[in-house]
Image (cartoon, rainbow, N blue to C red):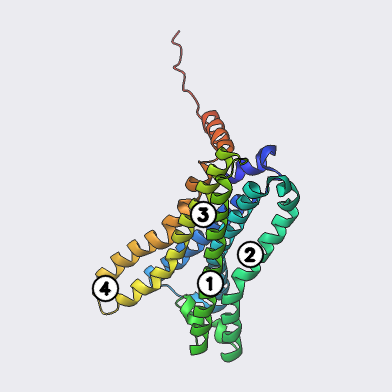
Amino acid sequence: MVFIYFKEPVYQGVLRYMLFIHLLVNDFLQTALVVLLFLFAFFKGTMLLSVCSVIVLLSSCTSMNTPLTLAVMSLERYVAICFPLHHVQLCTVNRGYISVALIWLIGILPCISDICIAYAYWPPGYFQRYLNCKRSVFIILPSQSVKQAAFNAAYFSSIWAVVIYTYLQILLTARKAACDKSSASKGQRTVLLHGVQLVLSMSFFIYPLTEYFLVGQPQEVIRHVSFFNYYVTLVLPRCLTPLIYGVRDENFKKHLKLYLSSCRKKVQPLQSN
């Protein structure tokens, strides 16, 4: 889908597709980093703490980016349905670049603040040690946990407010006689899917909770439950993104069929003399 986006001119300059590709690339990067961290934890491997800080920073940032991107995508659909005459002026590619930059800035703040606190409190040379790479390694003060809980509460309540507001506004617009019923109905389903994907993207909060309840269980049980938990809460929601958004889109569906059919090579039997 990323290849099709950059290959086909029909997607260039369209904010909706730009945000979708950003979501795909972000989820791909997040899944790759989570897989790497899980493998290190599963096989009890250690990592240089300075390298771990970079991986944890990117992993945490990409996890936070997904809900923010979904909120911006909901706003784009809200403008397209409720203010169709102003959509071209409001939803430009330049504003899309600004939105993506703000998404990364907001997403990186919680984790980078924890890493900066760790740099300030740990003695020089501590980051040259080899340790198990986890986000919890950088939580060294009780106030950091309070700060993280407060940020998550404000963060997700704001995102849910945006998604619910845009859905209700599109629903009200769909009931108006002058509204394009088909377009509004598609907008409703799209924003509703944003909400479903938002629930799935929030499932990574379940992972540390279940890990906490596994304390004291046999090691074999912990390994099996941890793998299932990791797959369902961290990997599966990211794999559903291209199915929820890409396959539903008529343009992507058409180009996917075109590219997949062009990759098929028919094997012709050799003609015997």
Label 4 packing within 10 angstroms: few (<14), some (14-19), many (20+):
few
Q: Which amino acid does label 3 sit on?
A: His
Residue depicted at 58% across the width and 72% down the height: 54
Quadrant of the rendered image containing residue 43: bottom left
Q: N-terminal of the two: label 3 or label 4?
A: 3
Label 1 packing within 10 angstroms: few (<14), some (14-19), many (20+):
many
Q: Is the residue under label 3 in contact with that under label 1 (CB below 8 Å)?
A: no
Label 3 packing within 10 angstroms: few (<14), some (14-19), many (20+):
many
Q: Is the residue under label 2 in contact with that under label 3 (CB below 8 Å)?
A: no
Q: Name the residue under label 1.
A: 56
Q: N-terminal of the two: label 4 or label 2?
A: 2
- Front-lying residue, 261 or 272: 261
- Give the side of residue 4 with respect to residue 239, left or right: right
**Does any portion of residue 16 appear in the rendered image?**
no
Q: Name the residue under label 4.
A: 219
Q: Which amino acid does label 1 sit on?
A: Val
Mark 3 or 2: in front is 3
Q: What residue type is labelled 2?
A: Ile
Q: In this view, does 190 lie above or below 62?
A: above
Q: Is residue 212 above or below residue 15?
A: below
Q: In this view, does 109 lie above or below 201?
A: below
Q: Mark 2 points at which residue?
A: 103
Q: Mark 3 points at which residue?
A: 194
Distance (Cα) linking label 1 and label 4: 25 Å
Residue depicted at 63% across the width and 40% down the height: 178
Quadrant of the rendered image containing residue 51: bottom right
Q: N-terminal of the two: label 1 or label 4?
A: 1
Distance (Cα) linking label 1 and label 2: 17 Å
